[in-house]
Image: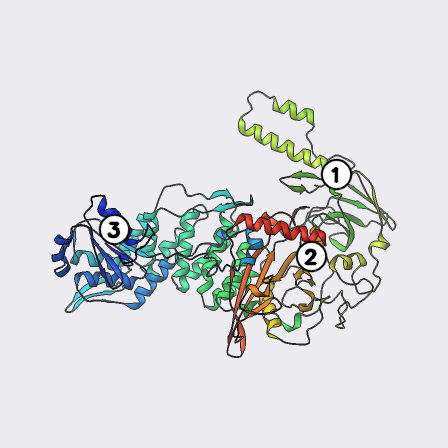
Amino acid sequence: MYINGSPAESGPNPRSISACLKAIDKSGTAISSQEMNGRTLLYFDREEETAHARVHPPQEIAGLYLTAESSGGLLQMVADFWKIDIDADTALLARRDRLAQTGKNTPIENAPRGVLAAFSSMYHMSAGPRGTGNRSTHSLSFRADERSTIQQLLPRIALYLGGDCRSTPTGWEIKPFSNESRLRSEIERLKTAAISDDKDRPLTTKDPTGETLIIIPPPKEEIQNALDNLAALGSASIPALVSFLSPERPGITQAVIRLLGAMDFPAARGALRSFAPKLQANRELAAPLLLAELARTMHSANDTATMEWLASVACDERAPNDFRWEARLALVDAGRIDLLAAKPTERNGLAPISFPIRNLPDGSKQANPPPNAINPLATCVDRSGMTWAVCLSPSLGNPTDLWLARGRGSRWEEFIFTGKSFPNSQMGYRGGYESLPAVNALSIAVDGGRVTLGPPRSRPGSMTNAEFQTALRKPGLTAIQRNNLIRRWQRENSMRQNVLRQKMEMKLSELRKDTDGDGLSDLVEVRLGTDPAKADTDGDGVPDGLDRNPVAGKSRSDSAKNRLLQDVFSAVFGGDTRPDPIFVVLDKPHWQEFMGSSARVICISPDEYLRKGTQISGLRALQFGGPAEPSSTILRLDGPCAFNEARTRAEVHFWRWKPQSRANPLWVYYGGDSAPIDYIALFSVHGWSWKLDGIKPWKINDVDTAMGEQMRRTYESMDR
């Protein structure tokens, strides 16, 4: 048996090769070793009985186990032991090595989340390549369990590497298959070996912050080996591998996605692109994870079709968020961030703030509403025949914000921000989050220029307490029926609690008031942080209502810092079509315009962002940061950017805050969904310009330290 390393690697570590050999010898198992070219050859026999085998290798063996970090190293072991020459096709070996790498990358879902992710940046613990964590050494492994001669063994090793072998006058030669019928036969054999009737379902668990995590277990070892060997046969095996793609078999599907992504054939990438819509339409629990995995495998692709597909996914609002984010990271890794880069014509020109509503003013349902369409809480018709609706919308940051919509026929014509939220004191709580009110949680009446919101005319929820008690005592009720009944009662009871109990009166003139005439109401400007009394807050000559960057004027310098921050923004939000504002959390001296998104971009200081809290927790945010103490890094700091001495490499640390769709008044104090995920962007100089080389997550392993740091920052923000 061959293993990596040397017996000389001794010391206190009980798992060193030397300590393991001594332990095996003490157990009574005959074993001896020999170091060859940095590897260790283990003989399961006594030293005196193996001396002859070292000079005259055996013609027949009872078994063999080989492990190496590359296919070339594996063949070298065979050549060294049997003292023969092996000539192998380099492209064949390179393909097998790429496939072996698919088992090395730890998926990004294993990266720290919640509190761990939020505060890991303080310790500057680099996690290695994107999503890998501490990269462990994996290897190719070959095993033969029956008696074999070298003439029988080499064809099996060649098949494991994806090729065929033949003897030559000087030794052996391993090349790709030339016999088509034998290749097809081998594909069918491996395809049959990979078929399994075992259950293949995702698992759920909790992370340290209590957030639910979905885990896709890998397939059994024999199935994985069959799939690996199948992929090693090259492009001819692609149809067989594609046949295993199914959302209902997530373990095998994830393994096949990784293998197809590593095969570097246009047909393989095309098969993955064709499979993506099937996953998007599937409601299986693991479908979003498989989509993210699919995008992740594309990072090494360089064909135009794949790059354009990734760019379209990154900007597709209907795609799952993780899928879109992985598509963006794949574009960064492939060096094609230009597909998400800012366009000079996108500086100004914004549509009025609006959001999709499922019901049309005439009472009909909207055909094919977008996923983020909102059900109005209540509607009414005024004396002029105009329809009014009151809705909850996070369009300006708070999921409990009350908005008015005015329309006629099949079109909503005006959206009015009230500046008021549904009273927190009148909300129920479920799982630590406020349970948002449902349809008919209040009533609305519009008379001239006055709007009145009041208690609902009919209580939401159709089941009374008496009806619930009667249904619960019904004979023959199964456990499942009983649980469903209890859940229905809890849901409807929560709906009955979440109703408006006191009248709220508003004047339309005050809601529409625009003191500076810039196209944004005073109430909207207060929420966004622009000046209600100044039409052009940043003084760049563009009114706030039309300015995509209303608080940060155009920078007078084109420094490396400005370009690096813009590249990170482009990677995260470039090409994004959502109209909701984006907050960029950055110390005020470093504010600048950020281009490339369809949304309004608001620069805000970290202290102000914490102070506003839940008012803007429903919006996307990109926070730039860095070490709290300049002495904690050897790099030279320029605001949130860190450069090396020669200014040829740079790092930018940032957090992605996820928008909250639920009201959580404790979002500052706890992790889970509301805590950001932190990353580091790596740059280097190519020619005369900076290039974004990659984005990877940061990591921390000390839960207690992270929690303590979070509470310290929270208390400091409260003191301020």
Of the residues under marks 2 and 3, which one precedes in the sequence?
3
Residue corresponding to mark 1:
499
Residue 427: quadrant of the picture? top right
Vertical relation: 694 (above or below) 393: below
Marker disc for residue 609: 2
Residue 135: quadrant of the picture? bottom left
Assign a secondary structure to mark 3: helix
Q: Amino acid at mark 2?
A: Tyr
Mark 1 to mark 3: distance in Å?
73 Å
Mark 2 to mark 3: distance in Å?
59 Å
Residue 694 drawn at (x, y percent): 50, 65
Residue found at x 31% / y 62% = 70
Assign a secondary structure to mark 1: loop
Q: Which residue is situated farthest in the bottom direction here? A: 688
Q: Residues within 10 Å of mark 2 (few under 14, many from 20)?
A: many
Is 103 on the left-hand or right-hand side of 429?
left
Marker disc for residue 21: 3
Of the residues under marks 1 and 2, which one precedes in the sequence?
1
The foreground one among 720 and 258 is 720
Is 63 on the left-hand or right-hand side of 286?
left
Residue 58 seen in the figure: no
